[in-house]
Amino acid sequence: MNILKVKDRIELDKRTPAMPWYVEKFINYKLPDLSPSSLLEYVRDYETFMGWLIAEGLTAATTFKEIPLEDLEKLHMDSIDHYKMFLSTFKPETNNRTTISRKLSSLRSLFHYLSQIAEDEQFYPLLKRNVMAKVSIKRTHKPKDTASKLEGKLLQEEEIYEFIHYIKSQYPIDVEKNKQALYSYEKNKVRDACIIILILNSGLRVSEVVNLNIDDIDLKKKLAYVYRKGANDDTFKTPVYFRQEAVDDLNEYFALREREYRPLKREKALFLAIANGKTEGSRMTKRAIQEMVIKYAKRFGKPYLSVHKLRHSFATDYYLRNDIYKTQEQLGHSSPETTQIYAHLTDRTMAEAIDHLKD
């Protein structure tokens, strides 16, 4: 079972009852089609919006649950414009253009459902007037624009090997005067290197790495069986290939997993960590893996590196050796349009390579 989905479903079930009845109805309508993670994002977006309605006095309600449908019908375009301005006042890392577009899109989905799909007992739409139908949401994720933002922030082929070498050999020298950092490194160096090398040789997402169990790795076939993003079928795992370069590090980690992390017999997670106050290892969290990568990246002199940029680094290199459809399948993209990012990135890479040949 997908561990992250289970956690998000628990959180979704906890938050949804605080929503108005019509939001609960919408969430239940979407449950068969969307993952708990996606629906949880919807609920969080509605919490932001309804909190703003209360703060602005656009409803007499004092809690989310009490906000009546009629208050949504009375909203003017000016109100939506003011809400967009409110969202834009957050720090860029909290609400960038993409996040704002997503929050507005979440609202539009709710309003569309209430005005076009859901009905009352007399078969009339629940929402008589849909102000969000007038709101245009600009597409923010153009592959060429995304590629431009990533330019210079990924690891090229030689840098991949340099980064791995740094983690294995140079990092402990850099932190030798910091006893706590050095102890943590010595304890987890094999695991950390294994995770980073696996991502750089497969393009797995951080959520896919977190969900990996021991039995999900086939070293002979060089396959990792993962729950793909957006897939609602928790009974099926997708086989994803990893390169030969990851095999030795996986073998080394397998050899010490039980000895170093002492997990309970029922713990099937591949990558483990021992939490403070605990004696046995349990599944690493998404945040722990992200922070671990950032820790090494900063010391390496590339503080902008993240788990997702390691995935992009793999994908750019993979695309150079394959075609867009193989890259799409390897990365688990639902659309080849997303994979076009790497076409733009590799155009620049090829141009740079030609320039080097002229030198």
Image (cartoon, rainbow, N blue to C red):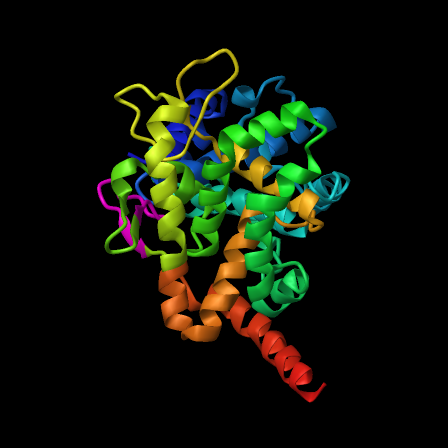
Q: Position of residue 23 (x, y in %)?
A: 46, 32
Task: Tell which of 250 and 201 is nearer to you.
Answer: 250
Give the image quarter of residue 345. bottom right
Task: Tell which of 22 and 5 is nearer to you.
Answer: 5
Q: Position of residue 37 (x, y in %)?
A: 43, 37
Q: Position of residue 352 (x, y in %)?
A: 66, 78
Task: Tell which of 229 and 331 is nearer to you.
Answer: 331
Task: Assign the C terminus to one quadrant of the image.
Answer: bottom right
Which residue is the extreme one toward the top?
277
Task: Tell which of 181 and 311 is nearer to you.
Answer: 181
Relative placement, left or right, of 96 versus 102 is: right
Question: Is residue 119 among what the camera can see?
Answer: no
Give the image quarter of residue 175. top right
Name the residue at 33% across, 47% down: 231
Q: Main secondary structure of the magenta part?
A: loop
Residue 134, compared with residue 327, is above or below; it is above
Magenta stretch: includes residue 236: yes
Q: State how many labels appear.
A: 0
Residue 187, compared with residue 252, is above or below; it is above
Task: Assign the N terminus to one quadrant of the image.
Answer: top left
Name the residue at 67% across, 81% down: 356
Residue extent of the magenta highlight: 225-240
Q: Position of residue 322 (x, y in %)?
A: 41, 74
Give the image quarter of residue 134. bottom right
Question: Is residue 136 among what the camera can see?
Answer: yes
Magenta stretch: includes residue 313: no
Name the residue at 60% across, 74% down: 349
